[in-house]
Image (tube, grey):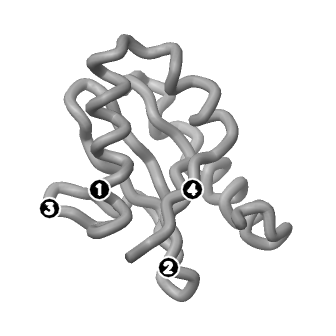
Amino acid sequence: MYKVILHPKVKKVLPRYPKKDQARLTAGIRSLATDPRPAGCINLREMLYRIRVGEYRVLYAVLDQELLVFVVKAGRRNERTYAELQSLIDQTKKYLESGSLS
């Protein structure tokens, strides 16, 4: 079983969504603990994956050696959703190196 950790920005933005969407997103994110690469997930770059949860996209990194799923972004898809992929990968590596994921 993988441990799922949310980026602080995800923790901050999640409560702003409607309750119904919050519940769906939370369920989708929690399911990553048992299957970090579910059917329909897409490998975007390096360790970064994406799942669709209704109108929302959840971008996350899978760290197999640590049995860790690090959710770096959750939100509605727009033109900027995938524009900052390298930045999200860099953030994940930074968190991993600093030990902030624990």
Which of the two discs, 4 and 2, labels the residue nearer the N terminus? 4
Residue nearer the viewer, 97 or 20: 20
| Location of residue 76 with respect to 86 vertically, above or below | above
The residue to which callout 3 is attached is: 39
Q: Amino acid at mark 2?
A: Leu
| Location of residue 34 with respect to 55 vertically, above or below | below
Pinpoint residue 21: horizontal percent, then vertical percent: 30, 21
Q: Amino acid at mark 1?
A: Ser
Q: Amino acid at mark 3?
A: Ala
Q: Secondary structure at mark 1?
A: helix
**In which quadrant is the N terminus drawn?**
bottom left
Residue drawn at the location 63% of the way across and 27% of the way down: 12
Pinpoint residue 13: horizontal percent, then vertical percent: 57, 24
Report if residue 76 is visible in the image.
yes
The residue to which callout 1 is attached is: 31
The residue to which callout 2 is attached is: 67
Which of the two discs, 2 and 1, labels the residue nearer the N terminus? 1
For label 3, count other residues whose C-alpha is less than 10 Å away and answer few (under 14), some (14-19) or many (20+): few
Residue lying farthest to the right in this orientation: 98
User: Mark 3 to mark 4: distance in Å?
Assistant: 21 Å
Which of the two discs, 3 and 2, labels the residue nearer the N terminus? 3
- Indicate the quadrant where residue 53 lies: top left
The residue to which callout 4 is attached is: 5
